[in-house]
Every structure is written in C-alpha cells, then in structure tokens.
Amino acid sequence: MPETHEVIIIGSGPAGLTAALYTARANLSPLLLEGEPSSTSDQPGGQLMLTTDVENYPGFPDGVMGPELMVGFRAQAHRFGTRIETVKATRVDLSERPFKVWVGDPGAPEPTYEGNCLIVSTGAQSLMLGLDREIELVGHGLSTCATCDGFFFRDQEIAVVGGGDSAIEEAVFLTRFASKVSIIHRRDALRASKIMQQRAFDNPKIEFIWDTVVTEYLGEDSISGLRLCNVKTDVSRDLAVTGVFIAIGHRPNTDIFSGQLEMKDNGYLVTRPDCSRTNIEGVFACGDVQDDVYRQAVTAAGSGCMAALDAERWLEAQHS
Ligand code: NAP
C-alpha cells in the first residue's frame, strides 16, 4: 500500500526546500523527494551544488559556497519536520486525487506514495557540451550563469559558447567585467534576434569565432584555455581564456509530467499568472521548472514560498 501524505514536494533546489520549510512550519508534514546523486545538475540540491562562490544570495555579505548554502536550506527544512527521501520520482499519475508518485521501477503496479497536494520543483539543467572534466570545472573557470559569475572575471579574457539570445545577452553583460569576450559559435550565423546580434556586433570588446566548436578544456585545476576546432577547415587551435560561459540552452526536468501538466513549447511548466497553480488543481510548480526568464536561486526560493502558501490555502479550502 502506498503511503499517503498531505503534501509531496518533488525536487530539492532552493524552490523545493523553501516550499518544504514553509509547508513544514504550517504543520503539513511535507514529504520531499530530493532526487538521487548523479553527475549532472539533475541532483539533490539542484544547480547550486555545481557552483562555488555565490555572491548574489541576499544575507551573505561575504558570499557563500553553493553546496554550503544548500546544506543550510536542507537543514532548515528538516528542522521543522520535513521528511526528506533521497530518491528520484520516476512516474506520476495526476489524473485523480490523491496524486500518485512512483520511485524506482516506474512500471510497478502500485505507486510508492500518494499525495493530496503536489509541489513540483524539479528544476532545469543547463545544457553542456559533454566534454571531459566539464562538471568538475564548473566553478573553476567554467560557468553557466553570467549574472552569477561575471564579476569574478574582471579585466580577464573569457569566452562564451553559443549563438542564441542567451549567449549574446551573456556576452554583452560580461563585457562590463572582462577585457575581451570571444563568442564561439558552431555556425557562421547567429540564432539570436537581430537586435541582440547588432548589440554584440557593435560592442568593441566582443569578438566572434565562427564555425567553431570547443573540443577540450585546457588547464589543470581551473580553465586556462580552450582547444577549438574549425568545423569547416578541421584546423585546431588553442584560445587562452581564464573563463568560459556555456550558453547553449537549458532543459527543464519535466519528462515525467509530459502529457499531464501544461507546458510551453520549450518544455517549461505553465503556471497561472501571479501564483504557482498549474492546470491541475492541487498541483503547484515553483522554481526553474516553470521559470525560463529569471533562473536565479533567490527567485526560485521566492517562488517556493509562493507554492507553499498556495498549497496551504488550497488544502485549507478542501478541508473546510
Ligand atoms: P537557443 O535559442 O536554443 O540557442 C542555443 C544556441 O546554442 C544555438 O545558437 C545553438 O546553435 C547553440 N548550441 C546548441 N547546442 C550546442 C552544442 N552542443 N554545441 C555548440 N553550440 C550549441 O537557446 P537560448 O539562447 O538559451 O535561448 C532560449 C530561448 O530563450 C530562446 O527562445 C531565446 O530567444 C529566449 N531568450 C530570450 C532572451 C531575450 O530576449 N532577452 C534572452 C535569452 C533567451 P545553432 O544555432 O547552430 O543551433
């Protein structure tokens, strides 16, 4: 028989753990499924587990390490009675209440848990190039967030990989700090909107390296350069940079909700304006899984709080 819970939270980044903190303090005894350790950002604690210094989380004037911040989030949620299970949800059935959640074998006839209310905070992953040592270099010269890490590259020469709006926006932003930004793109035309393109073309600190892919990260403990290959000529060369920002897109972790929760074309969950409600009553979404715009730890935490309050009020209305 599945265990039944009032609130089940799936995902343990800043959004999920904040939702857990608030629902625990509302005496709802939430069950949080935090995921399982893996080599990608789809893991307990979310993307901050792959970050070193976090200098833009309010309340930490001297900065804080990403994993340390998440240990604190987790301990605080736990302290007020959140039950945390280190398991990954592999299937959900949201067709009726209580909602059903499987962990382990998704083909098992019985779900593992049932929840009267569900908070989805499974986050998103930055797409990566898939090169050797990529994950271990995150925070050591390799970044996926210019807003978070640009500040560390003052007066340095750095690179951005990608040709979409994100890459161009990040490159332009990074010129506030870096002395030079090389945009490495695999084709000879950008995907980014024309206005963004023009902004980059007009910026004297930006140089384009066309028809080129990164084949290797250079440097022992941190990035000291990139090995590049021109895909048209097959000629390789090294580019000396102290930082590289990968901006080739994000993927929300929404596979298990496909066909059940309303999604945008890019796979992000749709929430109702100014709240965390999804298309299914009793299912709420918060954090990066429903945010393809801001993608910050502090906005994720804020939306986790919203989801908890929305869930609490919704449950109250069900019981009254
Ligand atoms: P995107 O539009 O999908 O662009 C991804 C870029 O990365 C493309 O140029 C793609 O190359 C390249 N790429 C993908 N996989 C790669 C790989 N393995 N190796 C090398 N390059 C690779 O993603 P995005 O830039 O993150 O934007 C996502 C959405 O958000 C878009 O709709 C965008 O317009 C929007 N956005 C808007 C703004 C804004 O308006 N201010 C800012 C950011 C994002 P190809 O071009 O060859 O496919």
Image: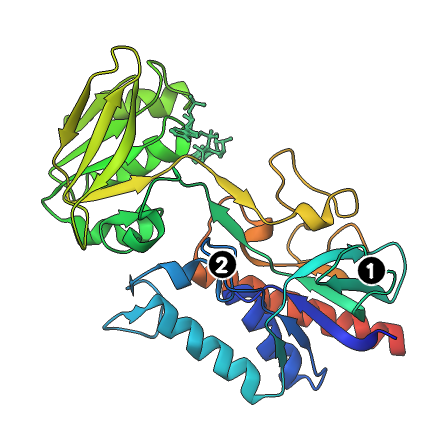
Instruction: Please state if 88 lies on the left or on the right of 92 as rendered.
Output: left
**SS assignment at label 1:** loop
Residue 115 horizontal/vertical position (percent): 80, 70
Which residue is pictured at 69% across the width and 78% down the height? 30
Which residue is pictured at 59% across the width and 72% down the height? 86
Residue 272 in view here: no
Residue situated in front as seen by the camera: 71 or 146: 71
Instruction: Please state if 206 lies on the left or on the right of 79 as rendered.
Output: left
Residue 275 in view here: yes
Which residue is pictured at 28% across the width and 52% down the height? 137
Q: Is residue 114 above or below residue 217?
A: below
**SS assignment at label 2:** loop
Q: Is residue 29 above or below residue 35?
A: below
Residue 172 horizontal/vertical position (percent): 26, 34
Per the image, the residue denoted by label 1 is 108
Quarter of the image with the N terminus in it: bottom right
Q: Which mark is residue 63?
A: none
Which residue is pictured at 46% across the width and 49% down the height? 294
Upstream in the sequence, badge 1 or badge 2?
A: 2
Residue 158 horizontal/vertical position (percent): 18, 39
Ligand 1 positioned in quadrant: top left
* Amino acid type at mark 1: Ala
* Amino acid type at mark 2: Ser
Per the image, the residue denoted by label 2 is 38
Quarter of the image with the C terminus in it: bottom right
Q: Quadrant of residue 71?
A: bottom left
Distance Cα–Cα, label 1 vs label 2: 23 Å
Residue 184 horizontal/vertical position (percent): 27, 27
**What is the crowding at mark 1: few (fewer than 14 residues within 10 Å), some, or many (at least 20)?**
few
